[in-house]
Amino acid sequence: MVSNSLMRRYFPALSLALLATLFLQPARLAADLIWTPQGGWRMEGGVLGGLDTVEGRNALEFMNKGRAAEEARHEREALKAYETVNRKYPNSVFAAEALYRTGMFYEQRQQYF
């Protein structure tokens, strides 16, 4: 049997360790962005990333325009859409992908800043 003094001594630390184990599990917060020509951009897994806001929907619209233009080989139009996402919606879930795609265009052109 465990004595009361030992229980009082270790109970706070054990409780904290148990809570940390239960609640601090690494949650999947990042969403994977998936592109399909039929459906456009969609997120898989993770959190919604603000798509329920007007800004989130606008960023999604520009991303879809950019990717459609990219696939149609309209580079200038695609760059304009991606740069709009970077400028107007830098905190959206799409900002990193837009920045990446913009960088890929500049790399293909060998335009290094």
Image: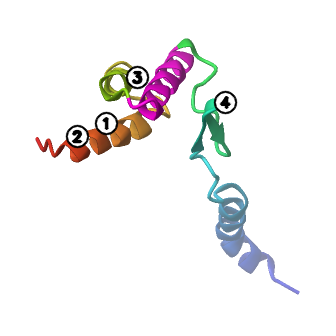
Q: Nearer the viewer, mark 3 or mark 1?
A: 1
- The residue pinned by badge 1 equals 102
As drawn, 13 above or below 109: below
Q: Nearer the viewer, mark 4 or mark 3?
A: 4
- The residue pinned by badge 3 equals 89
Distance of label 2 from label 3 (alpha carbons): 20 Å
Task: State the extent of the magenta-drawn residues as a range.
Answer: 55-73
| Mark positioned earlier in the residue sequence (4 or 1) | 4
Kindly indicate whether the residue at mark 2 contacts the one at mark 1 (C-beta within 8 angstroms).
yes
- The residue pinned by badge 4 equals 39
58 drawn magenta: yes
| Mark positioned earlier in the residue sequence (3 or 1) | 3
Mark 2 is surrounded, within 10 Å at the Cα level, by few (under 14), some (14 to 19) or many (20 or more) other residues, namely few
Distance of label 4 from label 1 (alpha carbons): 21 Å
| Mark positioned earlier in the residue sequence (4 or 3) | 4
Quadrant of image for the C terminus:
top left
Q: Check disc 4 and give the amino acid type.
A: Gly
> What secondary structure is found at the residue carrying circle 4?
loop
